[in-house]
Image (tube, rainbow, N blue to C red):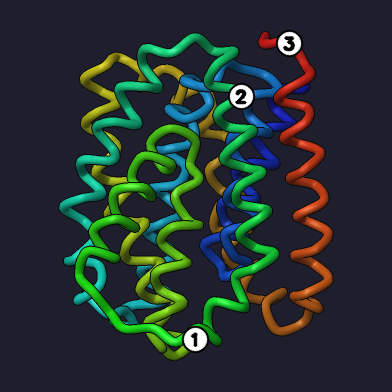
Amino acid sequence: MDFALIVAGVSLLIGLTKGGMGAVLAVLIIPLLTLVMPVPDAVSLSLPLLLIGDVFAIWMYWKTWDTRHVKLMIPFAIIGILVGTTLLATLPDLTLRRLVAAFTLLFVGFKLIDERLTNVRYEHRNWHAYLAGGVSGVGSALANVGAPPFTAYLLMQDLSPQRFVGTTTLYFAFINVLKLPGLVVVGLLDLNDLIGVVWALPLIPLGVWLGRWMVDRLNRKLFERFMLVVLVIASFALLLIPPR
């Protein structure tokens, strides 16, 4: 029952994230799944669910993106994905749990300062995109936490809110597709695991719909602060609760 509840909650979270509720929810996916499975299994199980969510997100934000930034970041993101996938396949689960906790706490720290980035005088350099792409690739492949470097870079680019969300949607859809071959090669992606959670798939479009409905109705600041507290608790749970 614990497993079913966690998978159901994660599927709904993925839908809410793709529906516009933001990266805070996405970062919670792996910590939640690691309550009932090792980190590599959590990453491999979440990826097909994320890809299904990406289909709805791409449809929702079709052609609202800025492809220039995506094209700059993707080549170096591929390198980062290769590094992250290698670490995921070779490091002990306890080490991976600590890395997930560290990445999650770094995300919390980033969210506390991200608004200040838009007020910084900034001159674009292509290597900024290369660095953001590489680091986000590692974080995404290792623990689904590639948002902070990508978001930090994009916040400096003076994009409209709609273009910002559209570019984020397109970038992480590409990232999730690019993660798939690596997980297959290292033997972490198990089709039987996905078949076992097919029942939860309808919760993803439901979450997308709820996310779109909630975007204009929730106090976004209060919601994000609450979720940051949840992420800190989840990080300490990863550090203190023994691996299953």
Which of the two residues, 188 or 101, is positioned nearer the viewer here? 101
Pointer 1 or 3: first along the chain: 1
Pointer 2 or 1: first along the chain: 2
Instruction: Give the side of residue 144 with respect to residue 3, left or right.
Output: left
Residue 47, percent from left and from top: 42, 38
Which of the two residues, 46 or 240, is positioned nearer the viewer here? 240
Question: Of circles 2 and 1, which is in front?
Answer: 2
Image quarter in which the C terminus is found? top right
Q: Mark 2 points at which residue?
A: 98
Q: How far apart are marks 1 and 3 (CA)?
A: 41 Å
In the image, residue 230 sits, relative to residue 154, either above or below, namely above
Question: Of circles 3 and 2, which is in front?
Answer: 2
Residue flagged by tag 2: what amino acid is it? Answer: Arg
Pointer 3 or 2: first along the chain: 2
Q: Mark 3 points at which residue?
A: 242
Q: Residue at x 62, y 42 (%)?
A: 104
- Quadrant assignment, res 62: bottom left
SS for callout 3: loop
Q: Mark 1 points at which residue?
A: 161
Which of the two residues, 64 or 190, is positioned nearer the viewer here? 64
- Quadrant assignment, res 82: top left
SS for callout 2: helix
Q: Distance between the residues labelled 2 and 1?
A: 34 Å
